[in-house]
Amino acid sequence: MTEEYGLLDPAEGEGEDFGDEWEEIDVSDTEADRIARKRDRKFAEFRKRLKDADQFKVEQSVFDDATFAAIYKLVQDGYIDAFGGPISTGKEANVYEALGAEDTDVAVKIYRINASNFQHMREYLEGDPRFEGIGSNKKEVVLAWTKKEFANLRRARKAGVRVPEPIAVERNVLVMELVGLVEDRARRLAEVSVENPETAFEVVREYMRRLYDAGLVHGDLSEYNLIIHDGELVVIDMGQAATVHHPNADDFLDRDCRNVASFFTRQGLDVDPDDLRAFVTGEASESASENA
């Protein structure tokens, strides 16, 4: 039933507290900041080569030295070997195709410190137990957001949700699995004709439930943040995913349920957002047990 869309198995041994145990996320200066301040000859040469590359010429005004230093550090550590072309260019980040370790294709997501939507990010960060005391410094907020996306991807993978595998993070640069090559890119659910909407819906709602059990709500889930590649449904754009302890978590979840229900209703299914929410949070099974 679910094999068509590649439903994953959750990782074993997470324990009863999975979803309530939160990793510490540090937004203090990294090795990349120290490299940028030192500006030795090797880094200066690397920075010049990168700035002269066609992919980065338009970004010279928004990528600061510390961003180039973060890329330099990831190259030194073996996570990036060579850059390809841009996959997407957004208001907050650019995503590039790159060659990673052992000739694997990876995606490199680079958040812009100066151009990112600061207030939008704060809305999702404030109330997250991993970022208590996060200040109003724009650089710290963007760095926190980048590390938050890495942590969200890792937590989702452990919960058995098919998301791009997180590989490395340095400052405002995230390296992750490339799902679909540029010339044969994965398609968003909104861009394809869904041949088996019943199965697709069952996979999506199961992934929503697993995220919730792991303590996360996607916060922007829709047919535009679900892609199909090689027969798998993949959840993307996990940067804004918030913990269930976030003061707006209920609102985020309600919005996700409305979006998903609306899409699959247009596919001919009878999906009620309240029923979907009950399934995701476990209220449906609790109600069934009480009525048994």
Image (tube, rainbow, N blue to C red):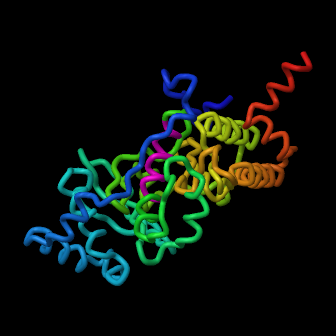
Q: Is residue 213 above or below residue 141?
A: above
User: In the displayed image of the protein, which residue is found farthest to the front?
Assistant: 133
- In the displayed structure, 11 sits above or below 185; it is above
In the rendered image, the quadrant that contains the N terminus is top right
- Residue beneath the point at 35% across and 84% down: 61
The part of the image, by quadrant, that contains residue 187 is: bottom right
Q: Which span is picked out in magenta?
A: 145-157
Q: Which residue sits at x=26%, y=74%?
A: 65
Q: Residue at x 28, y 55 (%)?
A: 99
Name the foreground residue: 38 vs 270: 38
Q: Is residue 232 left or right of residue 194?
A: left
Residue 81 spot, x, y in % from top left: 22, 56
Image point 49% across, 71% down: which residue? 92
Question: For the view shown, which residue lies furthest in the top direction?
Answer: 292
| Position of residue 41 measured from the top left corner of the image (x, y, whole percent) | 7, 72
Residue 265 rendering spot, x and y as whole percentages: 83, 50
> In the rendered view, does 38 fall on the left or right side of 112?
left
Relative to residue 259, is residue 31 drawn left or right? left
Image coordinates for residue 112, horizontal then vertical, percent: 41, 72
- Look at the magenta stretch and give its main secondary structure: helix
> Quick check: 84 above or below 62?
above
Membership of 150 in magenta stretch? yes
In the rendered image, residue 140 lying in the magenta stretch gets the answer no
Q: In this figure, what is the number of numbered marks?
A: 0
Residue 196 or residue 258, whichever sits in front: 258
Q: Nearer the viewer, residue 189 or 116?
A: 116
